[in-house]
Image (cartoon, grey):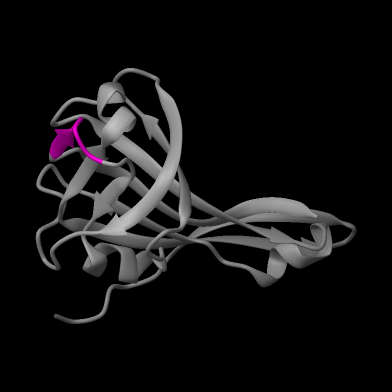
Amino acid sequence: MLKILRAKLHGIRVTECVLDYHGSITLDPEICGLAGIMPLEFVYIWNKHSGQRISTYVIYGEAGSRCCILNGAAARTCQKGDEVIISAFEYVAGPGDISQRSPVVLTFDAHNRVQERLRYIVEQKDGGMSFNIADDPLPEA
């Protein structure tokens, strides 16, 4: 089994930190839907400002709120306004399966509006692999 990236929210800003909560990260379900991130899904979170790396699970907040709220112990690792990277992974049988996946990557502006949706593309050819980043246009609003 090989663990590979399935979805990434790159540069989303922390909107709140709530220490007195059960744990988790609260995310806007509309953003999660664009990336394919599910409620209760295990995610890794990397803080671009502090270098902190944590893991927790996702809960959905209010649709359209563009929220990114660190809860419980995770709240100690970030401050409001910090840029974070949130990544979800999946297991595949082996290297031959990588080219059959195309992880979704969302990038954000300073107000947590999705700027672009990208796909990571791995192609296998001539006994090797190549990596490219492709635009994946967002659906019309």
Nearer the observer, 27 or 8: 27
Farthest residue to the top: give it: 50
Q: Is residue 35 magenta?
A: no
Q: Is residue 49 above or below residue 8?
A: above
Report the side of 102 relative to 124 (left or right). left
Q: Which residues are magenta?
A: 16-21
Q: Position of residue 65 (x, y in %)?
A: 9, 59
Report the residue at 19% width, 33% height from top. 20
Farthest residue to the right: give it: 127
Nearer the observer, 98 or 69: 69
Report the residue at 19% width, 38% height from top. 14
Q: Position of residue 94 (x, y in %)?
A: 82, 59
Which of the 4 image quarters holds residue 92? bottom right
Q: Position of residue 141 (x, y in %)?
A: 14, 80
Report the residue at 14% width, 31% height from top. 81
Report the residue at 21% width, 46% height from top. 68
Q: Is residue 19 magenta?
A: yes
Report the side of 37 relative to 127 (left or right). left
